[in-house]
Amino acid sequence: MSDYILRQATENDIPFLTEVVVQAEKSNSDKLRYSTLFNISEEKARAHITSMFEEEISGCEFSFDAFVVAEFEGVPVAAFGAWIEGVDDENPSAILKSNLIGYTFGREAIEALKTKAHLLKDVITDRTPKTLQFEYLYVSEQHRGKNLSNLIIQKLEQMAQERYPELKKAQIQLYGNNMGAIKVYQRNGFTIAQTYKSNQPEILNYLPHNEKIIMEKTYK
């Protein structure tokens, strides 16, 4: 581990964080929901994800300051994001994210999303206020097996507890087919708390899987 440096992400990491979001969202598939649901190319979706990070909005999954990056020889090779939902009476992350998408993607893409709302209703989940919300873990292939996921999770937890000592719980939302990630989180004390599943086959045209899982961890 001595060759790796863990640090909070900065604006300069946005290109890598865009890749983190894309790879985490695909969840072992070729489906990127920011492309499929909005009827745009993956290239355009990547550009929009980058633009959302560049807005510098804190408190949601597109806040670059929410990420911890593992750096190797000056290059980011892994990252994970986490924020405390609605702490200090901040707006819910769902509203922040919705505003970012509305501003960035444009009306035509938003209208395309609305036509698929009926497919998503069974897998949309709320985030619990005052909990640590993890989102978007990715480790570059050549750096896997180096314990980076565990170390980044521990760093994010430490940062969150320093900011909010009353923190009692953490949550992670992920697709049910992401068995590798589930095992990583279980090793870090998370257990499966809830499962949301869509029985509409068409959803698999747009998402990597038809099942969403919420994993939780409690702190003393």
Image (cartoon, grey):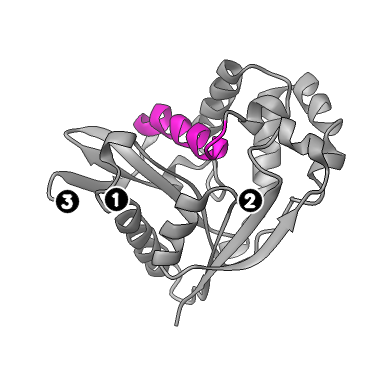
| Residue 87, percent from left and from top | 57, 63
Instruction: Give, as a three-letter code, the residue at label 2.
Output: Ser
Residue sitting at x 58%, y 60% = 85
Q: Secondary structure at mark 1?
A: helix
Q: Is residue 10 above or below residue 214?
A: above
Q: Dominant secondary structure of the magenta stretch?
A: helix
Q: Considering depth in this image, is 145 or 114 the residue closer to the camera?
A: 145
Q: CA distance from mark 1 to mark 2?
A: 26 Å
Q: Does 23 lie within the magenta span?
A: yes
Q: Considering depth in this image, is 23 or 85 the residue closer to the camera?
A: 23
Instruction: Give, as a three-letter code, the residue at label 1.
Output: Leu
Residue sitting at x 73%, y 25% = 38
The region drawn magenta spans 12-29
Q: Residue furthest left?
A: 2
Name the mark on residue 1: 3
Q: Quadrant of residue 194?
A: bottom right
Q: Which residue is mark 2?
A: 93
Q: Which residue is mark 1?
A: 148
Q: Secondary structure at mark 2?
A: helix
Asked whether the viewer can see residue 218, the reply is yes
Instruction: Give, as a three-letter code, the residue at label 3.
Output: Met
Q: Residue furthest bottom?
A: 220
| Residue 193, percent from left and from top | 62, 69
